[in-house]
Image (spheres, rainbow, N blue to C red):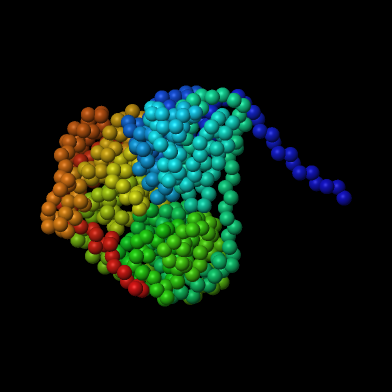
Amino acid sequence: MSKTKRPKKAKPAFSEMSTGEATVATLLAHGLDTVYALPGVHNDHLFDALQRAGEALRIIHTRHEQGAAYMALGAALATGKPQAYTVVPGPGLLNSSAALLTAYGMNAPVLALIGQIPAAAIGRDEGHLHEIRDQAGIIARLVDHSARIDGPAEASPKVAKAIRAMAMGRPGPAALECAIDVWGKRGTVALAPPLPPRPPRIDDDAVRAAAKLLGKAKRVLVVAGGGAQDASIEVTLLSGMLQAPVLAYRRGRGILDGRSPFSVTLPLGHELWKEADAVLAVGTRLNPATAWGVDKNLAVVRVDADREEPARNHKPKVALIGDAAPILRRLIDRLANYNSRRTPRDDEMRVRQGKMRGRLSKLAPQLAFLKVIRDELPEDGIYVDEVTQIGFAARLAMPVYKPRTFLSPGFQDNLGWGYATALGAQHARSDVPVLSINGDGGFLYTGNELATAMRHRIPLVAVVFADGAFGNVRRIQEEQFGNRLIACDLANPDFVKYAESFGATGRRARTPDELGAALRLAFAAREPTLIEVPVAAMPSPWEFIHMPRVRGR
C-alpha cells in the first residue's frame, strides 16, 4: 500500500531588514493599515520604517500620548479589529497607560509599541532619557500579553504572536517594547504569517445541559455584554425562542435592536432579575447584576471566552467557554429539542417599557437632549459617551439599534476618555458619523486633539455640555457632605472660540431644538465640529444605577 505524501510546508522567505522594517511588514501582513503615534527619539528607526511603507500604512500623529492610545482604542472598539499605537518609553508609556488600562477593561485589541532605553542599560538605573524602573513589569500589569523585541529576527514572530494573543480567549490589549538601538539593527528576517487562533472545543455536554435548563425555565433573562458584540443574530434568535428580555447596560447596547420591546436597560433589568428563574449571561462580567443577589431559585448559565470568568462572583449552573456566536448557534440547535411552549410576552414587555419610561421621566432635561441626538444620529452612527450627566442617562434610556454603535468606557469609567476615543472611532469608521458627548470637565482632558482632527481632516462632531463644574463630584458634596464644596468648580474657555482657534467649526446651542439643528448641520458638513451646550445642574440618575439587592442575603 502506497503511503500518501504529505504536502511540504513552504519554507519561509528570508530577507535582510531592520527590526523596525520587520515590525511594519508584519503589521501590514496582519491587515493593520494605521498606526496612531507620537514620535520621539527612541523610536526614530521605527518611524523611518513606517515612512518607507508609503501609502500602505497611515500614520495619525496626535498632540499627546494619551490621544494616540485613546484613538487606537476607539478604532478597535468601533471595528472589532486590532489597532496599533506607538509612543516613547517612560513618560510616553505612562501618558498612554490610562487608555491601555481601559482597553484591558473593555477587552479591546490594542497593540502598544513602546520604545526603550539602550538595550545594555535596561535595568541598570543609569538615568537614561525616559528611563523607568521595570518598564516591562509596569506594562505586564496593563495588558494580557507583553514581550520585548531584542533583534530583527524576533520582531516578526513576536508581533504575530501578540496579535494572535489579542484574539485568543478573552480579547484584550498587548504590548511590545523595543530598545532605541534595536529598532534600526539589521539582520536576516523570515516574516511570520498570521497565526490562526486556537478556539476552544465546544463542550457539547455543557451545551445540552444549558439547553435543558433554559428550555424548562419559565422566565428567562438574557444579559448581554461586550463579548456578545459579534453574536447579535444569535442573541436575537434566542430572545425570541425563550421569550426572554435582553438586558444590556453599556457595552451590550445594540446587540438586540433597541426598538424591540425585549431590549431593556438597567432599571427594568433590575425588576426582571427579581422575577427570573434562569439567566443566560453572554460575554459579560455580570456587573452590577450580581450585586442584586442570587438564590437557589435562580439558575445561571454563562457564556464567556475567559475560562476563569464564570465562577469569579457566583458559580453558575452551566459554564460554556469560547466565542459567543458559535456557542450560541450550537445552543439554538439543541434548544429546539427541549424548549417549552411559550406564551408571547410582547404585550407585557411593551407595558413594562411604558411604565419604566414614566419612572425615567424625572431625567427630563437629559432625555430631551438625548431625543434630538437619537433623531439626528443615523441608525449606524456611533455614539461615544463620557462620564457626564448626559452619558449616564444615555446608558439608561437612549435607544441603540446596532452593535458597536454605543461606546462606553466599561468598569474603568475614566473621565476624559471620550473625545480622543471618538476621534479614533471616526477615523476608523469614516463611512458613518460619530458623535462625542462630553462634559466641560472631561472634554479638556483631550480637547487639544482638535488639532489632530484638523491636521488629518477627521470629521468628528463633539458636544460639550457645560455646567461649570465636575457635576457628579459637586452633587455628592451637596447631598452627602452638607454642601461643603471643594475642588469641583471650573473655569472654562469659550468653547466656540476654542474650536475656532483650531480652525474647526464652533457652534452654541441652548435648547434641545437648537442642538438638533446644530447636529443636522454638522453631520451634513462632515467637518470637525464642536457644539457647546450651556446647562444647569441636572437631575440625579443614581437611583436607576445603584439599585438594591433583590434576591438572597
Does residue 289 appear to the left or right of 47 in the view shown? left
Tell me residue 521's x, y (percent): 26, 39
Tell me residue 214's x, y (percent): 48, 71
Q: Residue at x 44, y 32 (%)?
A: 124
Q: Residue furthest left?
A: 483
Tell me residue 195's x, y (percent): 59, 42
- Judge whether 453 appears above or below 436 on screen: above
Does residue 222 appear to the left or right of 190 in the view shown? left
Quarter of the rendering occupied by the C terminus: bottom left
Q: Residue at x 36, y 46 (%)?
A: 382
Tell me residue 543's x, y (percent): 24, 62
Which one is in front, 382 or 302?
Answer: 302
- Judge whether 390 appears above or below 520 on screen: below
Q: Residue at x 19, y 32 (%)?
A: 497
Does residue 485 appear to the left or right of 503 in the view shown? left
Quarter-of-image position of residue 509? top left
